[in-house]
Amino acid sequence: MKVLVTGGGTGGHLYPALSVMKALHESGEDHQLCYLGTGDGLEADVIPDYDWIDFKKIKLKGLSRSSPYRFFKGLALLPIGIFQTLLVMLKFNPDLVYGTGGYTTFPPAFWGILTRTPVATHELNVKPGVTNRLLARFVDKTLLSYPDTADYLPTDNSEVTGTPVREEIRKAEGAAKPEDFGLQPDFPIILVFGGSLGSRILVEKVLNEFKEANNKEELPFQFLVQTGREGYSRFEGAVKNLSTRKIRLVDYIEEMGSVYGFSDFVISRGGAGTMAELIATRTPALIVPWSNAAENHQYFNAKLLEKKGGGITVEEDEWTDFPLMDELRATFASEKRLKNMRDSYLDFKGDGGAGSVIEELKKLGREESNVTD
């Protein structure tokens, strides 16, 4: 089966797509895979590492809602990207198009619909983005990470599959140990991160409250804080001055599977990728949704996690005054509360693997084959 795969230029769109491509490649079946992306998205750094993926670049930008200049720039590039995608479609001649949302999903889905090539889009957030809402009426199948998403779509032609997660994270294992980060392995560990770029407001809050609380009493937990590579120099000095082993700062974490495996709690943003990882690893979390996220989708992701019982949601405008250390003390004082949070993830469909997605893609491929025959 020849599959054209695409997704917006962020890790939240890319890594689920990559998980599906890896599973197809490792299945032992004869699949040809092409990834359509841009030259300046994350995919340009990641996909070339896989020589079995045919990487095709197009000129395309998202239609910014916050900047008129970037909106019109994106609008001007759209016909170029659509034409370049047509050339890719004609040359690769896919049996199936699979898109994980974002602006790069629209051109191949558009041509797939026109050429009657089966198209499956995957909505990774609770509240769907503009592209997937627009395409939902016309594609062959809309795959959903969460059942609640169906309420936002103008069609019932959908299937809940969960979100594919990288295998090393799904199994929450790897070579790294707490000691590698200067942490104590027999003491509760809280992971703080805001994605690969980090989050200034998360780090500032944790460092400030840690410093104040640690001066008064011995805290019953320790922190591993990922700042992002650009933010590390901003906070490095503050941590060195604390003279404690209970908080460690890193710019980037390569071994995320290992870190999820030994972390007892997470403080993070509410992006689709993070939500999928929390669910797959069953890690209790406190989520601070990014207020500028498109469609406010991080808020809806976080609230679903909270409703199920696996997470606590704190909105950005409440974050500064939120009694963080008090909340963490109360949480870690009750092993039953932590267990209930972990167990709540059992209500989510799927285990983070790509199997459910691939099953739906193969169904579409077989249906098309039957029509052709």
Image (spheres, rainbow, N blue to C red):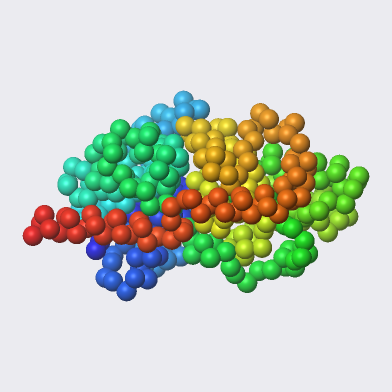
Instruction: Name the one closer to the observer, 220 or 78.
Output: 220
Is residue 236 something that shows in the picture? Answer: yes
Residue that sits furthest to the bottom in the current view: 28
Q: Quadrant of the N terminus?
A: bottom left
Residue 4 percent coordinates (x, y): 30, 55
Can residue 14 be seen here? The reply is no
User: Image check: 188 left or right of 344?
Assistant: right
Identify the image quadrant of the C terminus: bottom left
Query: Which residue, as the protein is rendered here, is positioned at the far right?
Result: 216
Q: Residue at x 40, y 39 (%)?
A: 149
Number of numbered discs visible in the structure rendering? 0
| Residue situated furthest left in the rendering | 373
Residue 240 x/y as whole percent: 84, 53
Percent position of residue 91, x then y? 22, 56
Front residue (pair 183, 330): 330
Residue at 86%, 42% (x, y): give it.
212
| Vertical relation: 270 (above or below) 356 | above
Can you name the residue that lies furthest to the top here?
68
Q: Nearer the viewer, residue 51 or 216?
A: 216
Q: Is residue 121 left or right of residue 217?
A: left
Above or below residue 70? Residue 175 is below
**Residue 72, position in %: x, y?**
41, 28
Looking at the picture, tell me which residue is in the foreground, 4 or 268: 268
What residue is drawn where x is 61% and y is 50%? 341
- Residue at (55%, 32%) from the top-left corner? 292
